[in-house]
Amino acid sequence: MSSQAAVPATATPNPLPDPERAPDQAADRRRWIALAIVMTAAFMDLVDVTIVNIAIPSIERSLEASFGAIQWITAGYALAFAAGLITGGRLGDIFGRRRMFLIGISGFTLASALCGFAVGTEMLVGARLLQGAMAAMMVPQVLAIIHVTFPAHERGKVFGMFGAVVGLGAVSGPLLGALLTQWNLFGLEWRPIFLINLPVGIAGVILGRKFITESRAEKALRLDLIGVVLATAALLMLIYPLTRGRELDWPLWGHLCMAASPVMFAVFVAYERYKTRKDGSPLVELSLFRVKSFAAGIAVQLTFGVVMGIFFLVWTLYMQIGLGWSPLRSGLTGVPFSIAVSLAAGLSVQQLVPRFGRKVLQAGALTMMAGLLLYIWEADRYGTGIHSWQMIAPLVVMGLGMGLIVAPLTDAVLSDVPREHAGSASGLINTTTQTGNALGLGLVAVVFFGVIDDARPTSPAAVGTAFSDAFEHSLWWVAGVLGVIFLVMFALPARPKQHLEAGAVEDAAEAATGTGLPEQRQEEPVPAK
């Protein structure tokens, strides 16, 4: 699940005319080309997140990568993306959204080339970190550019198109990754999953320079680079030992780093309070956590990110290494899951949440748990002889549950947040989700690979059994985390307020992909040179 999915699915801009900008922009057909460019960039990021998982076993075999390195290929991207999202949005506000978008897509394309031509795991991990950082610079500008490019009465249609792109990216990523890996184009095996970004990125840079109009915030806040460093350090002190500890036999320094991580988070909070008093431009608006529903919602987003981080990686390893399936078969097996998520997401937002409120999200958590338990039962009963069609039922149940959660969750979390902080809150929600994803990927070393280490398989049959057992063990963990999510959801509003209207939805939608606070939204169009 990529970051953009955090955009409130129920948020529909109020179709009122914008007298100041509508006449000029309505006559400018170039804006539709600009829309295609930024949506293609968003699609490229979405696909890049999901496309990698399906190719992980091929990367592991080709580069003889350790499982720790495999975790960092996925977790490194998520961590760099999470750490840079809010800062990326503010850079656009200060220096210009078009400029930062072009820098971001150029860097993302370069990082993709480095990934595709990586000669070892160290180079690939480093390139993925760079790719995540560049995505954090590129992605926040997408909806901000849409906001300043289209008049208010057209934004409803545009945001609807953007939602379709989000859904298409989520579904097509695994299939595209499976096809590119299975085809083994020019003997490159997994490398085309990254190299495919090169022509798209180069075209985006060339066309973006010509068709995207520059804009920036009139009253942008200052950067909080120290806050970024402190938050990133705290996360690294927790995630890096989790990822590397198993391979290094859990050294003392790893335990000390993990123990010191909460202390670093405390230092970060103290600095953010100081930053608020000093110039009112902290990285994180701490006053938001005084809102009970928001604090609970952030906890839900974090733990749900952990669920996604664990499940999707171990699921891929289970199918391709444990069961010996091809990438294409694995990708096709996941199609019912993706379809179920899409169907339930639309149903939950349009019909269920307006009638039943918070209960829909809690029903989603319980439904996902039911799907996981069914999956555990089937994996245990059929072992390594399980077929794709036998996975359809648990995957559909899980997908329905996830759809009931992901679409309305952001609106529920923002329900009691003051109007003036909607943008900041949405940006923090998205960052938290990515952080949880990185943490979940780090925990795979404990909940999945720990079981395999204990089994010490020595034959192909034993490897399959060990991976199947590790998969079941991981699903028990995921089900337990969903149980916690179900309980925390009681702190969400019983019936979320539909308060994201007119300008508020634009604030929230922009910040959901990392752009800055609502106070920054006094856009000042800058003529493109």
Image (cartoon, rainbow, N blue to C red):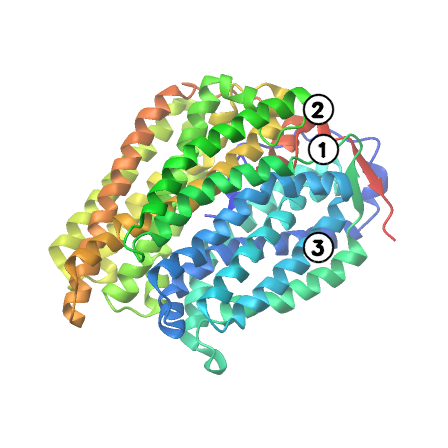
Q: Is residue 38 left or right of residue 44?
A: right
- Residue at (39, 74) in percent of width and height: 62
**Residue to which mark 3 is pinned:** 103
Comparing marks 2 and 3, which lies closer to the viewer? 2
User: Regarding mark 1 in the picture, which secondary structure is present there?
Assistant: loop
Per the rendering, the mark at residue 222 is: 1
Query: Pointer 2 and pointer 1: residues touching (CB < 8 Å)?
Result: yes
Look at label 2 and name its amino acid: Asp
Q: Position of residue 48 (x, y in %)?
A: 51, 58
Q: Give the CA distance from mark 1 to mark 3.
A: 20 Å
Tell me the kind of residue under disc 1: Arg
Q: Earlier in the sequence, mark 1 or mark 3?
A: 3
Q: Which mark is residue 279?
A: 2
The spot of residue 493 in percent (x, y) is 43, 19
**Residue found at x 67% / y 52%:** 38
- Count the marks: 3
From the viewer's perspective, is residue 129 above or below residue 61?
Answer: above
